[in-house]
Image (cartoon, rainbow, N blue to C red):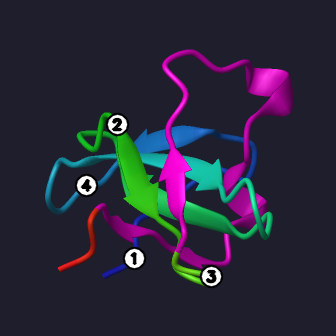
Amino acid sequence: MPSPVEDGVISYRCFSCAADIRFEACHKCEYPQAIPSRWFGAFTCGKCETKVEIPRQRLYSTSVKARIVRGYGHTYPRF
């Protein structure tokens, strides 16, 4: 069941599993994707499968918003 997410948010908490979800973009292909916030160091891009470092701090103005997310990232390294 999809969770209702406002278009302008940069993260949200899933109502069904209580996971904190962040929205990030790949630095290589710019693919916007959703990842769990518990992945602290890096994730694998869901499109080009490269390693993407997750920034420790981010600004709302430069962050990926929920309305443009197109896919999901994977753990790094991908299993």
Residue to which mark 2 is pinned: 41
Q: Going from the N terminus, do you reach mark 4 or mark 3 first?
A: 4
At a point 57% along the width and 15% down the height, the residue shown is: 57
Q: Which corner quadrant of the image does residue 79 belong to?
A: bottom left
Which range is magenta? 50-76
Mark 2 vs mark 4, foreground winner is: 2
Residue 44 horizontal/vertical position (percent): 44, 67
Badge 3: few (under 14), some or many (20 or more) residues near its Cα, within 10 Å? Answer: few
Residue to which mark 1 is pinned: 2
Q: Secondary structure at mark 2?
A: loop
The amino acid beneath tag 4 is: Phe
Badge 2: few (under 14), some or many (20 or more) residues near its Cα, within 10 Å? Answer: few
Residue 69 horizontal/vertical position (percent): 68, 67
Q: Which mark is residue 75?
A: none
Residue to which mark 4 is pinned: 15
Q: Which corner quadrant of the image does residue 62 belong to?
A: top right
Residue 59 part of the magenta segment: yes
The amino acid beneath tag 1 is: Pro
Q: Going from the N terminus, do you reach mark 2 or mark 4 first?
A: 4
Q: Going from the N terminus, do you reach mark 3 or mark 2 first?
A: 2
At a point 22% along the width and 49% down the height, the residue shown is: 19
Q: Quadrant of the N terminus?
A: bottom left
The amino acid beneath tag 2 is: Gly
Residue 37 part of the magenta segment: no
Residue 18 horizontal/vertical position (percent): 17, 48
Label 2, label 4: how far apart the Cα atoms are: 25 Å
Q: Secondary structure at mark 3?
A: loop
At a point 14% along the width and 58% down the height, the residue shown is: 17
Q: Which mark is residue 48?
A: 3
Badge 1: few (under 14), some or many (20 or more) residues near its Cα, within 10 Å? Answer: few
